[in-house]
Amino acid sequence: MKKISAVILVLLAGVTSSCMTATAQERGAVYKPSAENIAARHWFQDAKFGIFIHWGVYSLMAGAGEKDVAEWVMEEKQIPIDKYERLATFFNPVKFDADKWVQDIKASGAKYITITSKHHDGFAMYDSKVSNYNIAKRTPFKRDILKELKAACDKAGIKLFFYYSQLDWHHPEYYPRGRTGNVYTGRPQSGDWDSYIDYQNAQLRELLTNYGDIGGIWFDGWWDQEKGPMKDRWRLSETYKMIHDLQPQALIINNHHVAPYPGEDVQPFEQDLPGENDAGFNTTFVSNEMPLEMAQTMNGSWGFNLVDDRFKSTKELISALVGAAGRNSNYLMNTGPMPDGQIQAENIKTFHEMGEWLKIYGESIYGTRGGPIGPRPWGVTTNKDKTIYIHILDWKDGEIFIPLTDIKIGDATLLGKDEKILYEMTDDGVIFKIDREALQNWDMIIKVNLL
């Protein structure tokens, strides 16, 4: 008993020592973005709006009759690997049409797409040579949807990003396990963590060498090990260097919910505006040195869910887009395609409604940065060159005071109508006098041209 205890203590000491060393290496690493990467960051910030796509064999389960279950169905319903693998034999999305997807997404006004290449269930949605657990080899569909989607995006001028889950409920070497994908999976009670990281990096190399230039890699799942011994053994520096060596312009986005690590290019926030943490798991730290991105579902589910009809209105979604832009952030809006390969009709309808709004008001979003006035209960501001856009989302009075000082206004108009707006300069700011009828619009935008 004492000998066993001593061995365990030695092993734990070794793990702790490795973790401490890795932590120092990861946090202390020096990262200098390349010129290509900096240019890509600027493009990303100008683009402002993207569509997230969560799609995999889990779509066949359609949430299993529960509104809060979708891409996590394997974990939520405790489905063993040998049973879950059967889903691939039924997955045949014959109505998948990459060009149709991209046309509808482009109609929304989105400038880029981020799609799941491998989610937590370990199933690859592309023709991986590293593992045959993928759509081309295990399904009757036998097509590489990432290749088809990339071709459609290239034709339409849309950038494509690949989501990749660091967490893997299927791979036998993902061990020790984190807080998910445990005993029910049927995986062995042992494994070689570094072998799993090698596997992960081999798949990432495929994604970075077989699909031409991509926008970047969107990671998820680091948090699975956050309270375990592998928290700091993800070998992030090695992985990030490989990505930037293969594609210097590729942006690395890691949804780990903590402050950014060196090598990352965009800080994401899940189901939350930057810094707010209403979801309860995001960091309140907001970087002022890199682009930001907020990811949000259109209903309550990331993947397709048959009974989840909690669809946000176009007004709610555009308000989130505007709120993100006012916080100097992009907005990544999610859809979960159906198992037959089609995007839900409700989502397509919203895409087109958002696109119509952006045709009129897009100049207040695209190419802008967070405005000179931080978010207020009534709305936000954005700015571009010598123009300030004041987005009034919730204000009913005929006058609104904006604390803009030390500016010279050329004119102020109501965006979309080009109607002049009267204003009065004071020592403390500007009072804009608004027609009450105009305030009936839920996002009234005052365009202020500065001299």
Image: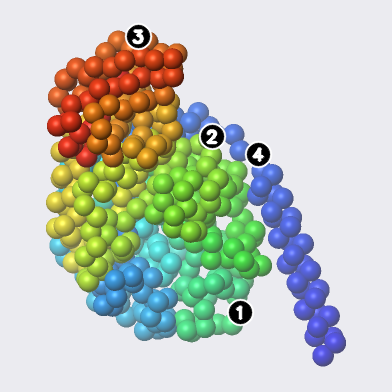
Location of mark 3 (residue): 451
Secondary structure found at label 2:
loop
Label 3: how many Cα within 10 Å (few below 14, some 14–19, many 20+)? few
Query: Where, by quadrant of the figure, is residue 438 drawn?
Result: top left
Query: Where, by quadrant of the figure, is residue 376 drawn?
Result: top left
Among numbered discs 1 and 3, the one appearing first in the sequence: 1
Secondary structure found at label 3:
loop
Location of mark 1 (residue): 190
Give coordinates of residue 41: x percent, y percent: 44, 34
Q: Residue at x 66, y 47 (%)?
A: 27
Camera-nearest label, 4 or 2 = 2
Among numbered discs 4 and 2, the one appearing first in the sequence: 4
Give the CA distance from mark 2 to mark 3. 29 Å
Camera-nearest label, 1 or 3 = 3
When the figure is inspected, residue 169 is found, relative to residue 406, above or below; the finding is: below
Nearer the observer, 43 or 388: 388
Nearer the observer, 315 or 204: 315
Secondary structure found at label 4:
loop
Judged left or right of residue 303, residue 14 is right
Q: Residue at x 18, y 67 (%)?
A: 340
> Where residue 289 is drawn, which disc sits there?
2
When the figure is inspected, residue 300 is found, relative to residue 12, above or below; the finding is: above
When the figure is inspected, residue 240 is found, relative to residue 344, above or below; the finding is: above
Secondary structure found at label 1:
loop
Give the CA distance from mark 2 to mark 1. 41 Å
Quadrant where the N terminus is found in the figure: bottom right
Q: Amino acid at mark 2?
A: Glu
Location of mark 4 (residue): 30
